[in-house]
Image: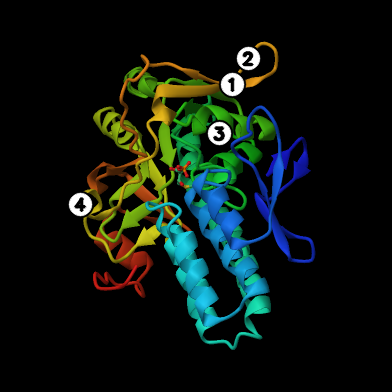
Amino acid sequence: MNIRGEHYRTIWPTDAHRSVTIIDQTALPFAFRTRLLRNAATVAEAIQTMQVRGAPLIGVAAAYGMALAMQTDASDASVERAHALLLATRPTAVNLAWALNRVRAALRTLSPSERPQAALQLAGQLADEDVAINQAMGEHGFGRIDALWRTRGGQGRINVLTHCNAGWLATVDWGTALAPVYRAFDAGIPIHVWVDETRPRNQGASLTAWELGQHGVPHTLIADNAGGHLMQHGHVDLCFVGTDRTTATGDVCNKIGTYLKALAANDNGVPFYVCAPSPSIDFSLTDGVQQIPIEERSEREVTHLWGLDDQGGVREVRVAPEGCRALNVGFDVTPARLVTELITERGCCRASSEGLAALFPERRIDTKRVR
Ligand code: MRU
């Protein structure tokens, strides 16, 4: 990823591996700030307050949280404590449990003296794997963009709509849904992104618009309700979104509002692609609407907004009547039938149990697996 022309990841070990540094996403787009995290408790707090967010990134951050816990206490009890603390931070993205279970399983096979080093190594490995997965998805998604571009004889521009932030800020690097966009842009295809603002936390306005701008990708911010209108008028060629949890049957849980975009895309014949790295696929679930836990956050995120005032101060203002109640559900489920294709690191497939089984034959549906 580019920040003022310099290459960054969103998380990296520091201080001879005694800490990790993150980009504080709550400060963007007004300030670029990093934060040093020294133990599992501060990693948990950073995930909960969404200083780090996005399904793949919270998985990797949690793995580093486990690794930091091992530096001071590598006992069995500490492994379980750190696992439980970090798992409780956010409920919807399965990447969190996936990463924590992977680290815990590895640590359980080792003696306490081996754990500090092994945990750091594994966290670093998960970070590198995330980058490789996203690069591969970028390549497969690029194939879809390039094919469309060729059918148009290389004329005009490709208009992509995306929701929330599934770019490099949501991962270690590259992003999920935006990886194909960056790949196409770098290949010289004229591409433009409609960025849903993504209320209530505005990840589109504050993060997606910012990171696309850093890379130089043309984009336009739109109100969440504008996408359907743009699709009706032929202004959207493709939708690319991410996922926090995809079931073995291809239902996709992503940031609240994704479902409405999928409905509008379906009604208007706009292909709706979901970039689904395998750590975000929960092969133990078969019904996204019934089985995926949906995060509920504070009412204040709906009744209030953060922004920069004319004096350069970042302020919170209320947009609802005083005392107005609000409901803040963070995610929704898009049924598989509305998804044109899942784009995974192993290639593209139908959003169905058959499609996923063909790409991941070793991951049979296992409804009894403990999550
Ligand atoms: O609540 P957030 O900001 O963590 O939600 C992020 C999303 O919904 C992303 O679309 C998702 O994690 C998919 S992939 C990066």
Residue 100, percent from left and from top: 48, 67
Q: Are marks 3 and 4 in contact (CB under 8 Å)?
A: no
Residue ID for mark 4: 290
Q: Which mark is residue 208?
A: 3
Q: Secondary structure at mark 2?
A: loop
Q: Is mark 3 within 8 Å of ligand 1?
A: no
Q: Which is nearer the eye, 52 or 191?
A: 52
Tag 3: amino acid: Thr
Q: Which residue is mark 1?
A: 315
Residue 24 percent coordinates (x, y): 64, 42
Give the mark nearest the N terminus, 2 or 1.
2
Characterize the local packing of mark 2: few (<14), some (14-19) or many (20 or more) Cα atoms within 10 angstroms: few
Q: CA distance from mark 4 to mark 2?
A: 42 Å
Q: Return the x and y of residue 23 as percentages of the image width and height.
A: 66, 44
Q: How crowded is the residue under tag 4: few (<14 C-alpha within 10 Å), some, or many (20+)?
A: few
In this rendering, which labeled residue sits more in front, label 4 or label 2?
2
* Cα–Cα gap, marks 3 and 2: 21 Å
Left or right, 32 with respect to 182, comes to right
Picture residue at 59% right of the left edge, 34% below the top: 189
Task: Point out the frontmost of discs 1 and 3.
Answer: 1
**Helix, strand or loop under label 4:** helix
Residue 309 badge: 2
The quadrant the C terminus occupies is bottom left
Taking depth in this image into account, of 81 and 220 the one nearest to the observer is 81
Do callouts 3 and 2 mark residues in contact (Cβ within 8 Å)? no
Residue 191 appears in the rendering: no
Residues at marks 2 and 1 touching, judged by CB atoms closer than 8 Å: yes
Q: CA distance from mark 1 to mark 3?
A: 21 Å
C-alpha gap between disc 4 and disc 1: 38 Å
Mark 3 vs mark 2: in front: 2
